[in-house]
Amino acid sequence: MKIGNIKIEGIARLAPMAGISNAPFRTVAKECGSALTTSEEIDANALIKRSKKTLDDIASYYPEERPIALQILGSEKISLVEGSKILQDSGADIIDLNMGCPVPKITKTGRGSAMMKNLNNTADILSAMRKAIKVPFTIKIRSGWDEKNLNAVELSKIAEDIGIDAITVHPRTRAQRFTGKSNWDVISEVVSAVNIPVTGNGDVNTISEAIKMRNYTNCNSVMIGRAAIGKPWIFDEKFESLSYEDQYKYKTKIINRHINLIKNHFSDRIALLQMQRHLSWYAGGQDRVRSFRVSLFSTKSFDEAIEVFDTYWKSLSYSKNLAKVV
Ligand SMILES: Cc1cc2nc3c(=O)[nH]c(=O)nc-3n(C[C@H](O)[C@H](O)[C@H](O)COP(=O)(O)O)c2cc1C
């Protein structure tokens, strides 16, 4: 599919996830086969204030990641326009607007999915952003604010008229947050209503499920979020057909790569926190994971965390339960 003039190969791509979809994780997802990656949400006001944490940890990306979509979050026209320009100047190939975050702290200031409430105001903001953004401009939406306000189709048509280049639909309402099942029919409805590319998202755990979503909804691509946490290799279509031993080797290579990227990208303190989280996820579903996690989260330095993980991970390779290491 093409988003504006940007060609995107492959069906599945990593979803933006705050605190998770940063440059190191996006890079390993991309190296495993994620078609395009999108940054986690970047607060427009923090961008304008040139917050160091925002610029260094959240909005930064590696040149090899390009084309890269950087996602902006905000509610005021001026800050969204100015923030988008900053992202554009930093080299974003695509700017995505977050219109789906359901977290009360975010929605109470009119950000995220609260932008689906007053479509007149939102249309005004989208038009102003469209005028300022020279690169492809996309939005990520939910099915609506709640069951009584299902307006994904209406919003998508407005967005297309304004010149938005592509839309991602996570078909849950804001009220559902992450509960219940995503309603893929809403994705189909948006696909039928507009002539711009639509990415479907929600409850996809494997590439075969991504293909199922595409066939069911006719969407152009699929975003995978939670299922990729601790398993970036799901973007590799070949992974499932590897032997358990080769899967284990593949995972070990990816984890090592991720560890190195984290170490070089963040300050020591953030690197340790990131490493603990990701290593804990990488161990998900394995033997003795609880005791491993207790040891991991009690480590005080990056090297200590790696050592604890290394001992644990190697013990798995010799375990007779190797077959479970998936
Ligand atoms: C921890 C977490 C953080 C998220 N942060 C963002 C975000 O920054 N921007 C965004 O558009 N969506 C965010 N999402 C939503 C995901 O992008 C995705 O829409 C949602 O998880 C549904 O897809 P899934 O079923 O594949 O996980 C987040 C989801 C999770 C679980």
Image (cartoon, grey):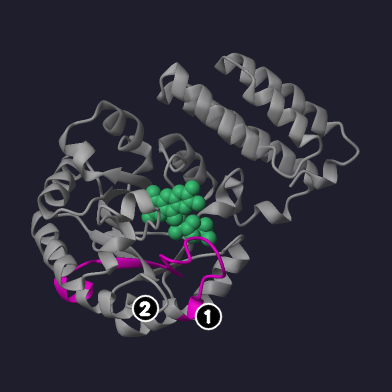
Instruction: Please give the range of residues in magenta.
Output: 159-185
Q: Is residue 292 left or right of residue 128?
A: right
Which residue lies under the disc numbered 1?
A: 216
Q: Nearer the viewer, residue 105 or 169?
A: 105
Residue 153: image x %, image y %?
A: 32, 80
The residue positioned 51% from the left and 30% from the top of the image is 274
161 sits left or right of 181 in the view: left
Instruction: Report if residue 313 is visible in the image.
Output: no
For residue 181, what is the image quadrant? bottom right
Judging depth in this view, the residue of 321 and 122 nearest the camera is 122
Which is closer to the viewer, label 2 or label 1?
A: 2
Q: Disc 2 or 1, which lies upstream in sequence? A: 2
- Relative depth, front residue between 14 and 294: 294
Query: Does residue 184 sit above or below 306 in this rendering?
Result: below
Question: Is 139 above or below relative to 272?
Answer: below
Q: Which label is found at residue 150?
A: 2
Relative to 252, is 180 above or below? below
* Ligand 1 quarter of the rendering: bottom left
**Residue displayed at 38% across by 80% down:** 148
Q: Position of residue 280 (x, y in %)?
A: 64, 34
Q: Residues within 10 Å of mark 2 (few under 14, many from 20)?
A: some
Check disc 1 and give the amino acid type: Tyr
Element at label 2: loop
Residue 150, quarter of picture: bottom left
77 vs 24, nearest the viewer: 77
Q: Exactly how many numbered labels are in the figure?
A: 2
Residue at figure coordinates x 55%, y 28% from the top left:
275
Which percent across, then down, holds residue 213? Answer: 53, 73
Q: Amino acid at mark 2?
A: Leu
